[in-house]
Amino acid sequence: MLAGCGDGGPPVERVRVLQLQPQVFPPPAGDRRAGIRLNASVAPARRAARAASPPVQVPRVGSIALGRPNRGRLLNGLQLPAQAPYWVTWDPILRRVPNRPGRRWATDRLLAFLVTVLRDYHLANPTAPPVLVGDLSRPRGGRFGPEYGGLGHASHQNGLDADIYYPRLDRTLRAARRPREVDRALAQDLVNRFVAAGAQFAFVGLRVGLTGPPAIVQAIAHHDDHLHVRIANASG
């Protein structure tokens, strides 16, 4: 499919959008709490992750994360679809659904990681609304700073980072404006699942009260509305 990158960057000659088969999203079977308990330790969480559904198989397109998350590029990336049964993308600058195409590119490994965690989260929380997925990387990675709106991103440069917005207590598909709007139980479940699935880092807000292994789950500024997940670079 020929297209451009969507919001002001250089054209991408051949856009590769992740295509997922319907069987990737089995319907939830009742209120099946087969996942990770709130504030569970890492070891039980990892056992629960292994017992969950098999990882989602994403086409391997030869994605390469070059350099570092804060100084890198993305080669042969995949574009996350605007929405699916268990997630909807969110544009943090325009504050609307969906996110623009040029802001949702990643390595094939990161997309497989995200889709698997979000599927298992929704199977364990079948009445929860879809998760809002924010910025990933630019089509070819590289700088994603304030020139793209808001505070910009210091990282998100090589296809290994993703912003996941905390579920809201009122269940609306918008980013929370204040920590008190966050459904902390569901948000903590998301954090636990990303940790159990092997996240290298999970950056959370200073005021939302989310916890986890301190080497992985770190509270930093400007993250009271979203979780910033990073996976390790398999390319070395």
Image: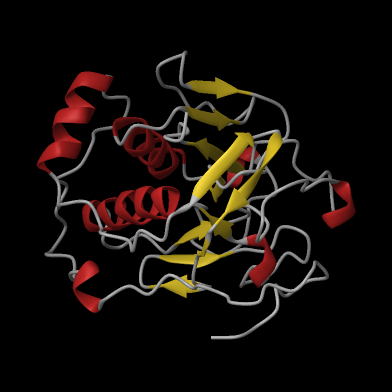
Q: Is residue 128 left or right of residue 161?
A: left
Where is residue 66, by image quadrant?
top right
Which residue occupies the foreground of this view, 14 or 41? 14
Determine if residue 187 is in view. Answer: yes
Residue 166 appears anywhere in the view: no
Residue 196, percent from left and from top: 29, 31
Q: Residue at x 72, y 28 (%)?
A: 221
Q: Note whether 70 is above or below 93 in the view shown.
A: above
Residue pushed farthest top? 214
On the picture, is 132 further left or further right than 113? right
Q: Nearer the viewer, residue 41 or 183?
A: 41
Q: Is residue 37 left or right of residue 1?
A: left
Residue at the location (18% across, 65% down)? 28
What residue do we see at 77% from left, 48% from top? Answer: 144
Reply above or below: 37 against 27. above
Colour option used: secondary structure
Along the line of sight, the residue nearer the viewer: 205 or 2: 2
Q: Position of residue 82 (x, y in %)?
A: 53, 73
Q: Nearer the viewer, residue 119 or 102?
A: 102
Location of residue 56 in the rendering, given as x and y in whole percent from the top left corner:
25, 57
